[in-house]
Each structure stands twice: as C-alpha cells, then as structure tokens.
Image (spheres, grey):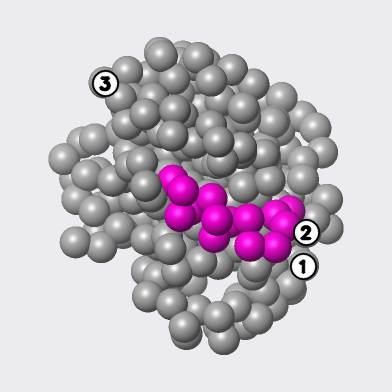
Amino acid sequence: MGVYQNILTSILKGENLLAVLIDPDKAMLKNIAGFMLKINQSKTTHIFVGGSTVNGNATDVLVKEVKKHTNLPIIIFPGDVNQITDEADALLFLSLISGRNPEYLIGKHVDSISKLRETQLEVISTGYILINGGKQTAVERETNTKPLSVNHIQEVIDTAKAGELLGMKLMYLEAGSGAVNSASNNIIKAIKNELNIPLIVGGGMRTMEQISNAYKSGANMVVIGTVLEEDEAFLDSLHK
C-alpha cells in the first residue's frame, strides 16, 4: 500500500496521525540512532525530512541514516529541488498556494521533474498554506511571500478549497517553523469543514494540549519539529 493510500486508510479508521519533521541542516547524524529509538516508542506515524534551506546532499545522507533505525514512512517535505532523494518513500509536492510567487506555485516543480524521473518516489500533490504565526519564518524569507492573515479566516478557507478543487490530495496548514502562535482551533475547524481531503497542521505546536486540540478541531495529521529541537524529552509525553 502506498503512503497516500495508507494515510487515507488510517483516517477512515479514525486514527490521529503524527509526523516528526527532521531538518537535515540541524540534525546530527551521530544522534539519529538514539533519537529514532525514542520516535519508534512514541505515537509518531510518519517521518518528514526537509527544511527551508538545506545544503548539498544533506537530505540524502540523513534519510539513509534514518532508514537504518525505523520502519516508519519517510516523506520528503522539500524546501527546494536539491532535497529530493530516492531514499525516501514519498514526496510532498508542495505548491505554496498562500503566496503569489510563481517559483513556488509551479516553477520549482518544473525544475524538479528531470530529477523525479530518475526516482521511484511516490509524489503526493499538496497545497501548502502559510499563515501568520507571530514572527517572520524561514519559509516567508526564502519564498519571498507573505503569510495569510489569521484575521481573514475566509481567505484562508477559500485558499484551501481552491487547492482542493485544483486537484491537490493533501492540504498543509502551516504557521511556520518556530512559530510563536500555532494555527487556531477556529481556523482548523473552519478549513476542515470545507475540505474533503486530509488536513495536515504544523508550526508552533509545543504542548500536548495544542496537539490534542488540533485533532479535536479536525486536523488529520499534526507535525512537530521545533519543540523536539528545543527539548527532545517532549517525546516522553508521546509514548504509545
């Protein structure tokens, strides 16, 4: 079963999915074995690998190391074309639909095709919506786009629905790495009420209460990353 079909099947079973995002530029290879041991003992269901800026073949090297220590699906969450690696199981083909920079709506995707042709990656079309999380994020800087305002909920909802109608298979609502404020329960609920595709929510999730509330509001998958970079012990609260 493919990664996307597995996500759909899990959702139909009523399961809450949890992804841990690992940034190749921040992860230390010597610590991966111990880190993945804790991940395997937690409620984590997926591993995301990627970052806004990643040097050289760091993604490929990291994914190879992670694969040695887990059977969880590894999904590339790419900030650029150089993060594509055939070592992963799938790729989120992200289109930054909250912005209007053509490079991140279609340009980078065209650039990636010559590389994707050489891989066996499962490519999952994903709408990517950046909302204001209270601080400028790396995504905002690198893509030269502005996040959508949380005070204009209807615009966020309409953007998500437009992405679905364009044929995207997943919708990723993001407050940005290290966000001060995560996506509010009201925004998550409002978007989920409009969508017929799975909703992923990330950015600024630092407590179990925030994660739990995101699920209750309609998130099918929650992504955490920065909280583990700051305090790996947070995984202890995510035991199965």
Kindly identify which residue carries mark 3: 240
What's the CA distance linking mark 1 and mark 3? 41 Å
Q: Amino acid at mark 2?
A: Thr
User: Residue 79 location, x and y as percent?
Assistant: 66, 58
Query: Where, quadrant-wise, is the N terminus in this rendering?
Result: bottom left
User: Residue 30 location, x and y as percent?
Assistant: 55, 36
User: Residue 31 location, x and y as percent?
Assistant: 53, 32
Is residue 107 found left or right of 187 in the rendered image? right
Residue beneath the point at 43% across and 39% down: 19
* Residue stretch rendered in magenta on the structure: 53-66
| Residue 143 numbered mark, or none | 2
User: Residue 3 location, x and y as percent?
Assistant: 30, 58
Kindly identify which residue carries mark 1: 101
Residue 236 in view (yes/no) = yes
Secondary structure type for disc 3: loop
Dot 3 alpha-carbon crowd within 10 angstroms: few under 14, some 14 to 19, many 20 or more: few
Residue beneath the point at 59% across and 24% down: 227
What's the CA distance linking mark 2 and mark 3? 37 Å
Dot 1 alpha-carbon crowd within 10 angstroms: few under 14, some 14 to 19, many 20 or more: some
First of labels 2, 3 by sequence position: 2
Secondary structure type for disc 1: loop
Q: Nearer the viewer, residue 60 or 6?
A: 60
| Residue 55 numbered mark, or none | none
Q: From the image, state whether disc 1 or disc 2 is nearer to you.
A: 2
First of labels 1, 2 by sequence position: 1
Question: Do callouts 1 and 3 mark residues in contact (Cβ within 8 Å)?
Answer: no
Q: Nearer the viewer, residue 42 or 125?
A: 42
Dot 2 alpha-carbon crowd within 10 angstroms: few under 14, some 14 to 19, many 20 or more: some
